[in-house]
Image (spheres, rainbow, N blue to C red):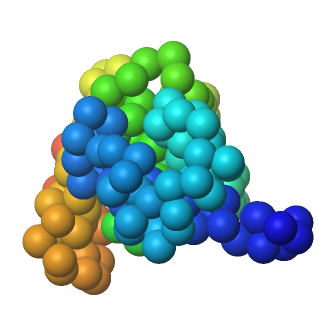
């Protein structure tokens, strides 16, 4: 097996596993179903991944890496730091809509701690750092920074559930979770962004 072919086979298995983990979670997935979904023999699957645990860890690692890439690209140059928080959550919602690997990484993080990178650590620390910059910047008062961080995290997790629900029904999300999240932020920013007097 050439290296290029092995890499393609491995990636096909990871994507098939991501679809299975996204839909059924770790317990509801099997190597046999993953093999069938990938169109790859069980022997080839176990050559690349001896256990379901190894496959899940690889899915988590890829979902984490994809998320980190988005986090590092989004909203850094925006003038108002709080807008970079909004942009980050919207970008994460879009990523969750489009990438079963990322949805699977998020679900596996909740279901199986310690068996791969924690998906939330790919974005929560950065989100908190952006909120810290918002407070330091001084252009906006955040009466309760911790509450805003919790709200943002819950919105992303809600977008994950929304994207999974639509995918399970065979529907292309088509911006639904992102549009809903954007509408929530429009509403919330009027309540959490209090301009400083004289500013």
Let me know if residue 78 appears in the view: no
Q: Residue at x 33, y 56 (%)?
A: 33
Q: Residue at x 57, y 28 (%)?
A: 116
Say above or below: 23 vs 98: above
Q: Outermost residue, left direction?
A: 169
Please tell me which residue lies in front, 28 or 129.
28
Q: Outermost residue, right direction?
A: 2
Q: Residue at x 47, y 37 (%)?
A: 52
Left or right placement of residue 32 versus residue 116 in this view: left
Q: Quadrant of residue 172?
A: bottom left
Number of on-image labels: 0
Question: Residue 171 at x, y = what percent?
Answer: 18, 80
Q: Outermost residue, top direction?
A: 114
Question: Residue 90 at x, y = what percent?
Answer: 40, 61
Q: Residue at x 62, y 57 (%)?
A: 44
- The quadrant the N terminus occupies is bottom right
Question: Residue 139 at x, y = what percent?
Answer: 51, 43
Say above or below: 24 vs 92: above
Let me know if residue 173 appears in the view: yes
Left or right placement of residue 134 versus residue 195 in this view: right
Q: Outermost residue, front direction?
A: 43
Please tell me which residue lies in front, 145 or 29.
29
Left or right placement of residue 48 versus residue 15 in this view: right
Please tell me which residue lies in front, 165 or 6.
6
Question: Residue 56 at x, y = what percent?
Answer: 49, 39
């Amino acid at each position: 097996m050439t290296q290029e072919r092995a890499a393609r086979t491995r990636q096909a298995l990871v994507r098939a596993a991501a679809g299975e983990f996204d839909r059924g979670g770790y317990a509801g997935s099997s190597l046999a179903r993953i093999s069938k979904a990938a169109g790859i023999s069980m022997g080839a699957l176990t050559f690349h991944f001896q256990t379901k645990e190894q496959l899940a860890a690889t899915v988590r690692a890829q979902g984490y890496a994809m998320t980190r890439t988005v986090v590092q690209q989004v909203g850094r140059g925006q003038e108002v730091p709080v807008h970079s928080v909004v942009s980050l959550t919207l970008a994460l919602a879009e990523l969750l809509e489009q990438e079963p690997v990322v949805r699977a990484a998020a679900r596996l993080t909740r279901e199986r701690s310690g068996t791969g990178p924690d998906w939330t650590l790919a974005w929560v620390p950065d989100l908190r750092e952006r909120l810290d910059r918002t407070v330091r910047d001084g252009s906006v008062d955040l009466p309760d920074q911790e509450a805003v961080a919790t709200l943002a995290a819950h919105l992303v997790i809600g977008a994950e559930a929304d994207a999974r629900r639509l995918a399970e029904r065979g529907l292309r999300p088509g911006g639904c979770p992102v549009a809903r999240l954007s509408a929530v932020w429009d509403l919330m920013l009027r309540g959490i962004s209090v301009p400083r007097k004289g500013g």
